[in-house]
């Protein structure tokens, strides 16, 4: 058997090989590292390998702590299992269910088309419009869901401007048949010149070759704009998700870690995080737009749409105003510490399951000819089951459980100084298709090359690092008191605990 055939056979069973070989290769950790730390490191690295290679489904890997922590003597099951249904998980679930309702009634399309009507049809402004829309939606929905919803809208807009993508590709490849393209162009081609019998015999051929070359350049320009559209959406979704606590999983992990390690810390909530992260998001989005534009190109609503928009706004306002720190929030009307962001989210999404999707009318009761259509709420449980990625709830729980088993912090620096950059940094991965799910979705369209993402993403990564460094060393310092070691962190200073940045990185695969 030759090497190529053998390698293909190995690839067919590579996941099974990883399942078997990964624990065997990590076994030395159990013998050469102190017992409890070695066991915990073994489980953490094993989960990281399985998550990165998807040797097991992500949700199944997330449940490994339930099996391994008790059996290896790291943590009892009564401490592991509750991590899978923390308050943070319900907050994230609220955002997922709200996304299902928005998708059901097409509110995301209404928002996208409204923004694009405002910005116009110039490529750079179109890219800005798509980035603003994607980042705004990603503040409330998951990055993956936002990318999946926005890419079809972008493709439809591009087809209306440039025609079919296959035609553009063909025009870029060939220099023959100058009449092959009849699609709309962004630039006006030169008018035909009238030939006379006095012209040189080869003038017609040269004119046709010139037209063909102009057509090819025009098609290449349009393909460039098309790539810019496709690449800006996942990047904007990743950036926008950092602005709110529910926007992306790493932000929720930060909240979970703070509540686990520092129960007395009340500095991070929806309002205070938004005040810190929204200016950072706007700054990075603006810089990212300049870079991508440089590279690639230069309410009449239905009752259901209006209702979803109303609850969407109420959802956001309640989260912002619960306890924003700089003013008194509405949580003061309840017993202190009893009402959280998760309670707000579950209340709002519960209303969606019984609020009517059609405008109620008293005339219906007295009109015998009115159709007796069944009552339809804004969101059905079947729709929520179909659209909500329930495995991500288990994935979050797996991260919390893994972090619960690894606890070590021995530096007298405000923990937020490390945890906030680690959290936002997990969303700023732009170079490769596998970096984030939004990147993978855009790359799977087949219109982008790896070199396109590497060329654009390298500068985006650098811009992200600089923006986070700027934010952490300017407005974050007075906002979170980073220049002092907080009292809420002191009781755990001497205990064995670990900075759980590895958890956030592993969970970045959820988008």
Image: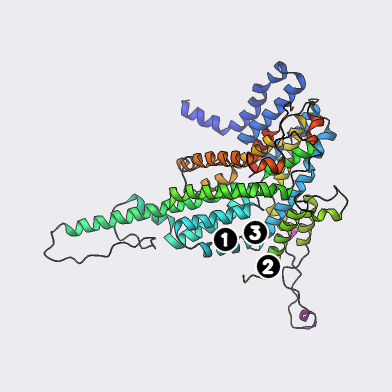
Near-viewer residue (449 or 179): 449
Residue farthest toward the right in the current orientation of the protein: 335
- Looking at the picture, how far across and down is residue 430, in whole percent? 54, 42
- Looking at the picture, how far across and down is residue 218, in whole percent? 35, 55
Task: Report the residue marked by disc 2.
Answer: 306
Marks 3 & 1, CB-CB < 8 Å contact: no
Q: Is residue 82 above or below residue 272?
A: above
Q: Nearer the viewer, mark 3 or mark 1?
A: 1
Give whichever of discs 2 and 1 has the lower sequence position. 1
Q: Secondary structure at mark 1?
A: helix
Dividing the picture into quarters, in which one does residue 32 lie?
A: top right
Question: Which range is magenta?
Answer: 356-380
Q: Secondary structure at mark 3?
A: helix
- Dominant secondary-structure state across the stretch colored magenta: loop
Task: Report the residue marked by disc 3.
Answer: 103
Residue 371, can we see it?
Answer: yes
Task: Report the residue marked by disc 1.
Answer: 112
Judge whether residue 374 is colored magenta.
Answer: yes
Residue 432, can we see it?
Answer: no
Near-viewer residue (94 or 491): 491
């Amino acid at each position: 058997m030759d090497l190529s055939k053998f390698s293909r056979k190995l690839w067919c069973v590579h996941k099974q090989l990883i399942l078997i070989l990964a624990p065997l290769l990590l076994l030395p950790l159990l013998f050469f590292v102190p017992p409890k730390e070695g066991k915990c490191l073994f489980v953490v690295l094993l989960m990281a390998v399985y998550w990165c290679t998807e040797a097991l489904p992500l949700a199944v890997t997330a449940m490994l702590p339930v099996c391994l922590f008790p059996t290896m003597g790291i943590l009892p099951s009564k401490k592991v299992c509750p991590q899978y249904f923390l308050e943070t998980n319900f907050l994230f679930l609220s955002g997922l269910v709200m996304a299902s309702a928005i998708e059901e009634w097409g509110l995301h399309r209404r928002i996208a088309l409204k923004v694009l009507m405002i910005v116009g049809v110039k490529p750079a402004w179109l890219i800005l419009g798509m980035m603003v829309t994607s980042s705004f939606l990603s503040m409330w929905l998951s990055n993956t869901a936002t990318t999946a919803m926005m890419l079809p809208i972008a493709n439809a807009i591009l087809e209306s401007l440039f025609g079919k993508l296959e035609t553009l590709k063909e025009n870029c490849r060939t220099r023959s048949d100058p009449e092959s393209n009849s699609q709309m162009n962004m630039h006006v081609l030169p008018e035909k010149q009238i030939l006379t019998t006095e012209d040189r015999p080869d003038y017609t051929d040269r004119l046709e070759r010139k037209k063909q070359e102009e057509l090819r350049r025009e098609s290449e320009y349009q393909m460039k704009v098309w790539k810019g559209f496709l690449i800006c959406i996942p990047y904007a979704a990743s950036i926008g998700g950092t602005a709110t606590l529910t926007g992306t999983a790493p932000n929720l992990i930060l909240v979970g870690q703070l509540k686990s390690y520092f129960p007395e810390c009340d500095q991070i909530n929806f309002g205070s995080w938004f005040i810190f992260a929204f200016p950072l998001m706007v700054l990075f989005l603006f810089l990212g737009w300049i870079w991508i534009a440089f590279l690639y190109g230069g309410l009449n609503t239905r009752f259901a749409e209006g209702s979803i928009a109303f609850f969407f706004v109420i959802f956001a306002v309640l989260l912002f105003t619960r306890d924003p720190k700089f003013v008194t929030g509405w949580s003061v009307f309840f017993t202190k510490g009893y009402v959280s962001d998760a309670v707000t989210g579950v209340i709002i999404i519960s209303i969606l399951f019984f609020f009517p999707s059609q405008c109620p009318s008293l005339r219906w009761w007295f009109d015998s000819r009115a159709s007796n259509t069944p009552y339809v709420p804004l969101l059905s449980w079947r729709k929520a089951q179909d659209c909500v990625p329930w495995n991500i709830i288990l994935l979050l729980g797996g991260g919390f459980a893994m972090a619960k088993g690894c606890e070590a912090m021995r530096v007298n620096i405000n923990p937020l100084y490390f945890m906030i950059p680690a959290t936002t940094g997990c969303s700023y991965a732009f170079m490769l298709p596998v970096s984030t799910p939004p990147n993978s979705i855009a790359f799977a369209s087949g219109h982008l090359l790896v070199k396109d993402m590497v060329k654009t993403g390298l500068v985006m990564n650098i811009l992200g690092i600089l923006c986070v460094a700027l934010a952490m060393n300017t407005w974050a310092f007075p906002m979170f008191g980073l220049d002092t070691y907080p009292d809420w962190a002191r009781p755990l200073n001497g205990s064995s605990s670990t900075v759980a940045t590895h958890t956030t990185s592993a969970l970045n695969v959820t988008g």
